[in-house]
């Protein structure tokens, strides 16, 4: 991974401390943004989220698997202009099935045990995002771009 040591702690803190992310999918003529509960893997290369199949986001992902997710630590205070950090994760989402779903569900539920009933429903899909690129923004204007290689 090509993330410099001085930026890695900020990125790791965002990915591990934030339980929710804004997920942007392609709705055809415009983007569609949803709030999703997320679990990021230790190596920051993958992210999991769950959604019922009867949702707009699931339909959008069935047409185009490219996604963007935003994780941030804002508090909606003026101090955010100096202190807040945000990470935009770009990647490809794939619905997990079989043993890959079971493995992913272990990671997801370790982060969100309160969603066990939700994810146990037959109508619930688990997606794994292969993170390709990360944009980290600090101090409202310092933008760093990191490419993750397989």
Image (spheres, rainbow, N blue to C red):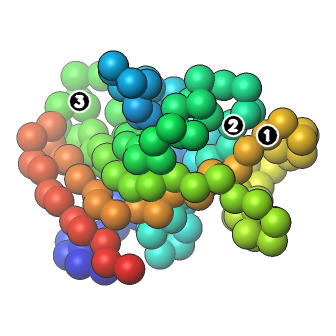
Which residue is depicted at the point 57% across and 40% down? Answer: 62
Task: Find residue 75 and report its horizontal and vertical position in percent.
Answer: 38, 28
The quadrant holding residue 70 is: top left
Is residue 44 shown above or below 114? below
Which mark sits nearer the N-terminus, 3 or 2? Answer: 2
Q: Badge 2 is on which residue?
A: 51
Disc 3/disc 2 C-alpha distance (Å):
33 Å
Tell me the crowding category of disc 3: few under 14, some 14 to 19, or many 20 or more residues within 10 angstroms, Cα based: few
Which residue is depicted at the point 44% across and 68% down? Answer: 44
Asked if one can make out residue 95 in the rendered structure from this viewpoint, the answer is yes
Q: Are marks 2 and 1 in contact (CB under 8 Å)?
A: yes
Which residue is depicted at the point 24% across and 68% down? Answer: 147
Residue farthest left in this picture: 141
Is residue 143 shown above or below 62? below
Q: Badge 3 is on which residue?
A: 79
In the rendering, which numbered label is found on residue 124? 1
Disc 2/disc 1 C-alpha distance (Å):
6 Å
């Amino acid at each position: 991974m090509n993330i410099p040591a001085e930026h890695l702690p900020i990125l790791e803190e965002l990915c591990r401390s934030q339980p929710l992310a804004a997920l942007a999918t392609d709705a055809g003529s415009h983007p569609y943004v949803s709030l999703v509960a997320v679990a990021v893997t230790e190596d920051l290369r993958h992210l999991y989220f769950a959604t019922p199949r009867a949702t707009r986001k699931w339909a959008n992902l069935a047409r185009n698997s490219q996604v963007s997710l935003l994780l941030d630590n804002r508090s909606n205070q003026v101090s955010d202009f100096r202190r807040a950090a945000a990470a935009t994760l770009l990647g490809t989402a794939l619905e997990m099935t079989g043993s890959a779903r079971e493995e992913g569900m272990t990671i997801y539920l370790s982060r969100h045990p309160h969603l066990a009933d939700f994810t146990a429903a037959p109508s619930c899909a688990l997606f794994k995002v292969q993170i390709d690129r990360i944009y980290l923004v600090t101090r409202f204007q310092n933008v760093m771009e990191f490419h993750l290689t397989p």
